[in-house]
Image (tube, rainbow, N blue to C red):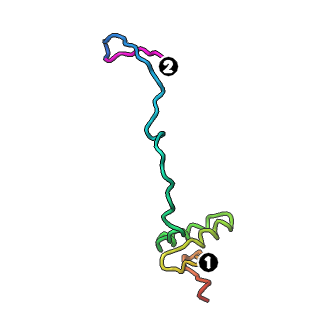
Amino acid sequence: MKKKKYRENWNGPFLSGVVIKAVSKASRMVRPLLEPMHNTPLPLSKKKDDDLQQIKKFCLSTESQDHYRRLPCEGEEQDGDNYSEVSDEGESTDYDSE
């Protein structure tokens, strides 16, 4: 414990007090572990998926491109194998439907 001098206002006298390490309430609380809200990834909106398919051509590695290609999208089956490709002209080619 340390004694510190302080003033209560600009021209007031110096007062002394003991300064101790403050312990917050948050550090004393026990927080329960939270369960995940979803067991599977949430599907992207069709518009967001279209944007990602356009942007993925700038990814350097094929693993990154495959990751973005396999993200679940609204209106598609949730089997985890989405093989749709976007060509340079912006047309979507779905290899599963052939």
User: Tag 1: Cα neighbours inside 10 Å, few (<14), some, or many (≥20)?
Assistant: few
Please give the residue where the numbered disc 2 appears in the rendered image: 1
Left or right placement of residue 19 versus residue 57 in this view? left
**Label drawn at residue 47:** none
- How many numbered marks are there? 2
Residue 1, placed above or below residue 42: above
Q: Where is residue 80 drawn, in percent x and y?
A: 60, 75
Q: Where is residue 90 drawn, in percent x and y?
A: 54, 76
Please report the bounds of the magenta region as a residue range: 1-8
The residue sitting at 50% across, 60% down in the picture is: 35
User: Tag 2: Cα neighbours inside 10 Å, few (<14), some, or many (≥20)?
Assistant: few
The residue sitting at 60% across, 73% down in the picture is: 70
Which structural element holds mark 1? loop
Q: Earlier in the sequence, mark 2 or mark 1?
A: 2
Please give the residue where the numbered disc 1 appears in the rendered image: 81
Q: Where is residue 38 drawn, in percent x and y?
A: 50, 67
Q: Nearer the viewer, residue 51 or 63?
A: 63
Which structural element holds mark 2? loop
The residue sitting at 49% across, 57% down in the picture is: 34
Q: Residue furthest top?
A: 13
Q: Where is residue 13 drawn, in percent x and y?
A: 33, 10
Which three-letter amino acid code belongs to the residue tagged 1?
Asp
Residue 35, placed above or below residue 92: above
Quarter of the image with the C terminus is bottom right
Label 2 with label 1: CB-CB less than 8 Å: no
Magenta highlight: main SS: strand
Cα gap from disc 2 to disc 1, whole angstroms:
63 Å
Asked whether residue 88 is drawn in magenta, I would say no
The residue sitting at 44% across, 36% down in the picture is: 24
Left or right placement of residue 40 versus residue 16 in this view? right
- The quadrant in which residue 72 appears is bottom right
